[in-house]
Image (cartoon, grey):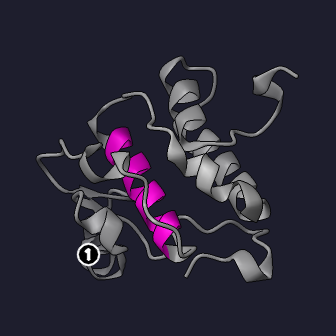
Amino acid sequence: MNTLFRRPRSIREVSVRSKDETQEFDAALREFLDTFYANPELRQEALRERPIRIDDLHDAYLAATAEHLARCHDMVPPEWSEQYGRKLKRPYFAGGLESLKARLTVESPAAFRRRLLFVSKNALSRPRIPHDAAAP
């Protein structure tokens, strides 16, 4: 089956699709999250392989995502996530609104904050997450 007709099954697939422009980063990440939450038996494998480099912002986001998902689901974060995605020099605030900065600073999960990414506490939530698989 052509991989473009299925959801990304790993963080690496998200990076490949984004880098080669076969899918926008945000869409690929959302589809990956749907797969991750729906398939508990595949979660460890989904985070195992290091993504390819995209750019500083997206690399940091993928590393934070992998670390956060692993911690939320009682897994050891992948080794690559410790050093990968550490090149941001200035903080990035999701949404781009000055009025959100204080809220995002407080809410942002630790895996994101330590990479200078400030997102909402539910940045990785999806509308159809199975009730027992929801990320805190």
Identify the image quadrant of the C terminus: bottom right
Where 81 falls versus 67 (above or below)? above
Q: Nearer the viewer, residue 86 or 97?
A: 86
Question: Seen in the image, is 15 located left or right of residue 29?
Answer: left
Q: Nearer the viewer, residue 104 or 84?
A: 84
Residue 116, quarter of picture: bottom left
Any magenta on residue 63?
A: yes
Identify which residue, 17 or 94, lies in the foreground: 17
Tell me residue 39's x, y (percent): 78, 59
Query: Which residue is located at x 26 percent, y 71 percent?
Result: 101
Give the amino acid at mark 1. Answer: Thr
Single out the residue that lies furthest toward the left: 89
Q: Which residues are magenta?
A: 58-71
Q: Residue at x 47, y 55 (%)?
A: 66
Q: Which residue is mark 1?
A: 105
The crowd level at tag 1 (other Cα within 10 Å; few <14, some 14-19, many 20+) is some
In percent of width and height, residue 89 lies at 11, 46
Magenta segment main secondary structure: helix
- Residue 84 location, quadrant: top left
Which type of secondary structure does the marked residue at label 1 adopt? Answer: helix
Point out the residue furthest to the right here: 1
> x%, y% of residue 80?
35, 45
Name the residue at 45% across, 76% down: 121
Image position, residue 130 (x, y; %): 80, 74
The reply, left or right, for residue 88 in relation to residue 93 is left
Residue 1 versus residue 60 in the image, above or below:
above
Residue sitting at x 54%, y 50%:
47
Quadrant in which the N terminus appears: top right
Q: Is 9 covered by the magenta stretch?
A: no
